[in-house]
Amino acid sequence: MLFTTASALVATLFAGLVSAQTPVGFTPAVEAKLEVIYGTKATIEPGTGFTKTETARQPTIGTSDVALNGTYVWLLIDLDVPSNFQNPSSGPRRTNLHALITGFKFSGQTVSVAGVSNPIYTLTSSSTGPITYVGPSPPAENPPYAHKYVSLLYETPEGFTVTRQQVGQTFGFNLTTFVDTVGLTAAPVRASYISVAA
Ligand SMILES: *[C@@H]1O[C@H](CO)[C@@H](O)[C@H](O)[C@H]1NC(C)=O
Ligand SMILES: *[C@@H]1O[C@H](CO)[C@@H](O)[C@H](O)[C@H]1NC(C)=O
């Protein structure tokens, strides 16, 4: 009985780990997947690898379970910027905000992408900011170190706005401070991440 309970607990823990769409150790952990499509290539599993060239232009984002019916802000954050570029392994890694774009809504359309079984309900925004998309460009390191880029989607209330000033610095971007500043108190509704090598 005890053994069964322990096994069930372990199974539950593993299920939790396997289904997280955010990187291990990232807060907040999010289980619902944001589909991120660069060209014709989607994020199949958490941490799917992409090249700099593939990610040069802003991806299409969406959902493959249900069409979302609200309004959303999308953030893309590099989690692995070295504090010391000369000696990357000498210090902690920091964040860099690569996109923060408001006004995403369901486009009314779906796309089908290899590797994702359901059609993807795409989201679009006529906005490009306040932080316009900048493609990943991780520096070469020895040994090589792929950077993790986490995408977060937050639902925003009616009339939500955010100024460039409220975002703060992109390098060392602090998500906790940001969501506090702009009043996004609810957890992100979707997330995923990709890996990009130099
Ligand atoms: C969006 O969908 C949710 C869940 O299906 C529903 O509860 C909510 O009322 C919907 N919101 C709008 C604005 O249609
Ligand atoms: C972000 O800011 C909060 C509140 O000021 C602070 O507690 C936290 O350590 C900061 N996080 C990082 C990664 O600097």
Image (cartoon, helix red, strand yellow):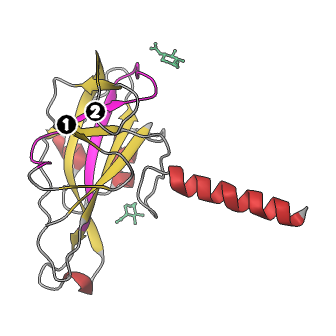
Q: Position of residue 81 (x, y in %)?
A: 21, 68
- Whole-angstrom CA distance, mark 2 to mark 1, is 6 Å
| Quarter-of-image position of residue 147 | bottom left
Instruction: Determine which of the numbered discs, if any, sits on residue 63 in the image.
Output: none
- x and y percentages locating residue 69 in the rendered image: 40, 18
Position of the C terminus, as image quadrant, is: bottom left
Residue 85 or residue 136, whichever sits in front: 136
Residue at the image point whose x is 48% and y is 41% from the top:
187
Q: State whether residue 35 is above or below residue 146.
A: above
Q: Residue beneath label 1, please?
A: 40
Q: Amino acid at mark 2?
A: Val
85, 35: nearer the viewer: 35
Q: Is residue 177 above or below residue 182?
A: below
Q: What is the x, y in percent for residue 142?
A: 16, 83
Q: Give SS at disc 2.
A: loop
Looking at the rendered image, the quarter that the N terminus falls into is bottom right
- Residue 112 to residue 45: above or below: above
Tell me which segment is drawn in magenta: 54-80
Circles 2 and 1, Cβ within 8 Å, touching? The answer is yes
Q: Which residue is most to the right?
A: 1
Residue 14 left/right relative to 190: right
Residue 180 locus on image (x, y percent):
40, 46
Q: Residue visible at 28% across and 25% down?
A: 123
In the displayed structure image, the side of residue 90 where residue 67 appears, left or right: right
Q: Is residue 141 left or right of residue 26?
A: left
* Picture disc at residue 113: 2
Q: Secondary structure at mark 1?
A: loop
| Mark 1 residue type | Thr
Indicate the quadrant where residue 132 lies.
Answer: top left
Could you classify mark 2 by the number of other residues whose Cα lies within 10 Å: few (under 14), some (14-19), or many (20 or more)? some
